């Protein structure tokens, strides 16, 4: 199996004047191609911190992050930015869409940022909009779309640069239950079709049932959870 993401003995603390908060205390995690890995854990347990480190948005205090077998050298900003742009798609709880751009422009944006021409990027965005059933809304602005459509749009955007892994922090956390499940199916189907690995933090124990493997983050460590 192709190893997409590997975290090795990741430690991270937040230091404030008053205290040091050890959030990650030695995290080891391997994610292979097509695997959907869930992270559960109480609020404040460090799920977002872990996802930020895994997604190269933040640096660990110690330990290694490898993407597609390549060790990330955090000292090189250029390498980090390039690895992130080429390999990782992000989905957040709140969609973070750009309000002044249309649906199709939002989806096309990561490709334009990566250097593709506008025409080429828009062309590549079309099938994604179709796949997420929002093609009809392609020229609408995010504010004109429903919550479920907005989140599907945000997910479509995450797939734009054909990432090897999608990192999602409570991707359906602001939707009601049935809508959350519907949106989540779109994410899973797209990931399956494209063989994209996923690392997903969630509170939703129903969603967790659909994942390959689930870990609980507690006291800075991961432990495997058996989901019934
Ligand atoms: P979760 O996503 O599981 O709710 P977080 O990773 O957001 O947890 O936070 C883990 C802990 O680290 C929390 O106690 C939070 O208050 C703290 N924390 C998060 N970010 C910072 C920061 N930038 N500075 C100081 N403490 C932080
Ligand atoms: Mg969080």
Image (spheres, rainbow, N blue to C red):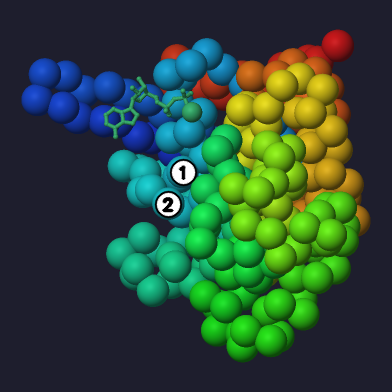
Residue 74 visible in the shown view = yes
* Crowdedness near tag 2: few (<14), some (14–19) or many (≥20) residues, C-alpha within 10 Å: few
- Quadrant assignment for the C terminus: top right
* Residue shown at the point (69%, 46%) measured from the top left: 145
Asked if 83 appears above or below 88 in the picture, the reply is below
The CA distance from mark 2 to mark 1 is 5 Å
- Horizontal side of residue 179 vs 155, given as left or right: right
In terms of secondary structure, where does tag 1 sit? helix
Q: Foreground: 120 or 143? A: 143
Quadrant location of residue 73?
Answer: bottom left
Asked if 143 appears above or below 205 in the picture, the reply is below
* Residue shown at the point (51%, 62%) measured from the top left: 100
Ligand 1 within 8 Å, label 1 CB: yes
- Horizontal side of residue 200 vs 71, given as left or right: right
| Ligand 1 located in image quadrant | top left
Q: Foreground: 161 or 79? A: 161
According to the image, label 1 marks what residue?
52
* Residue shown at the point (85%, 68%) measured from the top left: 127
The answer to the question of whether label 2 and label 1 lie on touching residues, with beta carbons closer than 8 A, is yes
Q: Position of residue 224 (x, y in %)?
A: 69, 21
According to the image, label 2 marks what residue?
57
Q: Position of residue 138 (x, y in %)?
A: 75, 63
């Amino acid at each position: 199996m192709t190893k997409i993401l590997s975290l090795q003995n990741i430690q991270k603390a937040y230091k404030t004047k008053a205290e040091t908060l050890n959030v990650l205390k030695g995290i080891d995690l391997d994610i292979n191609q097509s695997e959907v890995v869930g992270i559960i854990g109480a609020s404040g347990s460090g799920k977002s911190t872990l996802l930020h480190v895994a997604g190269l948005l933040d640096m660990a205090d110690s330990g290694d992050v490898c993407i597609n077998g390549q060790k990330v050298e955090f000292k090189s900003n250029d390498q980090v930015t390039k690895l992130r742009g080429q390999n990782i798609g992000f989905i957040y709880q709140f969609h973070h869409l750009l309000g002044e751009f249309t649906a199709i422009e939002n989806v096309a944006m990561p490709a334009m940022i990566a250097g593709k021409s506008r025409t080429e990027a828009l062309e590549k965005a079309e099938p994604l909009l179709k796949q997420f059933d929002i093609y009809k809304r392609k020229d609408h602005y995010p504010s004109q779309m429903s919550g479920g459509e907005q989140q599907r749009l945000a997910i479509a955007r995450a797939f734009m640069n054909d990432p090897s892994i999608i990192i999602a922090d409570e991707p359906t956390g602001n939707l009601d239950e049935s809508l959350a499940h519907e949106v989540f199916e779109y994410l899973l189907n797209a990931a399956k079709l494209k063989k994209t690995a996923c690392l997903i933090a969630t509170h939703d124990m129903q969603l967790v049932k659909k994942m390959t493997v689930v870990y609980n983050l507690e006291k800075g460590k991961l432990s495997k959870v058996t989901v019934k």
